[in-house]
Image (cartoon, rainbow, N blue to C red):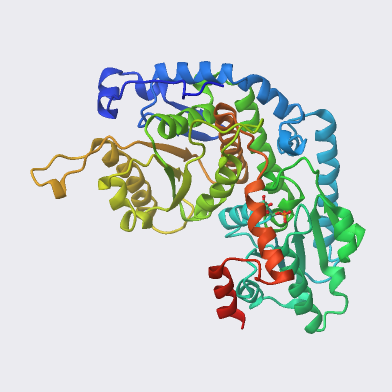
Amino acid sequence: MADFWPVESEKVSLAKLFESDPSRLGAFTLGAAGIYFDWSKTHLTEDLVRQFSALADRQGLRAARDALFGGRVVNTSEGRAAEHTAERGEGHPDSVARARTFHNRMRALLDAVEAGALGDIRHVLHIGIGGSALGPDLLIDALGRDADRYDVAVVSNVDGAALEEATRDFDPHATLLLIASKTFTTTETMLNAASALSWMAEAGVEDPYGRVVALTASPEKAMEWGVDETRILPFSESVGGRYSLWSSIGFPIALALGWDAFESLLEGAAEMDRHFRLAEPALNAPLLAAFADLYYTQLRGCETRAVFAYDERLRLLPSYLQQLEMESNGKRVTPAGEPLAWPTAPITWGGVGTDAQHAVFQLLHQGTRLVPLEFVAVAEAGDNQDEAHHRALLTNCFAQGAALMTGKDSDDPQRAYPGDRPSSTILLERLDPATLGALIAFYEHRTFANAVLLGINPFDQFGVELGKQIARSIDEQGTDDFDPSTRALMARAFD
Ligand code: F6P
């Protein structure tokens, strides 16, 4: 790999880019899988796209993509494939068949729950953390608001307050407990699961274990924990945690929305898979997005990127993306262990519009930092209020992009807006399972494309281990071997 970032460009303002190229809008917008993408208000140019495409060729993007979809080992540090696309029917035929078998088990258990085989179930308590919680939480919050099936609560935090809040309005006699953990060893999840089981037992539920379903790639661990084999929904080890909502980790999604919705979610994602695999670079949504990401981090020194969902139903999207992007691409060495000469993933942050306009947008318009923004909106309204609400929501969203780009002169520097601040806009036709599936798959592939161009492995996450080890060691051996600050904090809290 080069020891410099091998793409260059002259700095031209967004206004000039539009002025000098009447076809700019057409060149930097495209539609795929029910989603309209607009990068025309970013500094991408056709020349940059050519350079990034050439870089993608040199970095072996085609081969890497074939390896991803072909079920070959792409997670080299752990010697594993990354087969989330096989869950959607796009992958190695054996892996697709295996995923289908696992989905059939999910479907059969869903039917059994619906038929009352596990008792009168009205509530579902889903316990998991990170990738075992964020996807279900996002999907159910986005699409399950009007669903009239089961109340699903997702509990991730080990803080007992989270479990208390989730169970406050649940009847323990009518609750199904889902324990979602790829490894079935994650401390927070196992502690929450044990406490949830006690909550049921203490309320007099006759056979609390009979109400437990495990969603895991480690079925033998679930059995050791006491889950009956018939209520274990396995998934493949080659599906990464933050890519796992398509697997049995998505069981609460199927419970909340129904099986057909879960299938549509997979189909929408598969449509984006095919788009990513087949579209040429200049018309390839995940690739163009990655090119824009890399332009800002590598050529403009941006350290963060912000995502604003202009739709209440997508309010959890920024936190979902934080794990996907930062856990995948927050790396500092190549797969061969060599330090990189350039920055990797920016910090992903964001919020919901229009709220964020009244809180953090000041910095985005007039602060000293350049933050590329991404707006995610939905053309069709999701509410039954006067249509003025949705109109105001979308008008504000588009106005922000225009204001950031155009800026405004003033004799008074306090009141001047520098402009030339980039944003991309992602407009979904409607928010349904298929379109949301496609949107999430778009983000997965964009993250993968970024990793290939950066020269890193997006599928491991060793960075999260040290803190866990230290917490374990403090728990088991106390703080004697630790620094004075850590010792004092532990003493203040527990002595
Ligand atoms: O600590 C990070 C992590 O391993 C994530 O990658 C993962 O999504 C999360 O913990 C939960 O892991 P598990 O599904 O094994 O409980």
Q: State left or right for residue 336 relative to residue 17.
A: right
Which residue is at the front of the view, 469 or 111?
469
At horizontal 25% and vertical 28% (from top left) the residue drawn is: 15
Q: Quadrant of the C terminus?
A: bottom right
Residue 195 position in % (x across, y down):
74, 75
Residue 273 position in % (x across, y down):
65, 31
Q: State left or right for residue 451 relative to residue 117.
A: left
Residue 116 position in % (x across, y down):
84, 66
Q: Is residue 348 above or below residue 313?
A: above
Q: Quadrant of the N terminus?
A: top right
Q: Quadrant of residue 103?
A: top right
Residue 418 position in % (x across, y down):
22, 39
Which residue is at the front of the view, 117 or 98?
98
At horizontal 51% and vertical 37% (from top left) the residue drawn is: 344
Q: Is residue 97 above or below residue 192?
A: above
At horizontal 47% and vertical 46% (from top left) the residue drawn is: 347
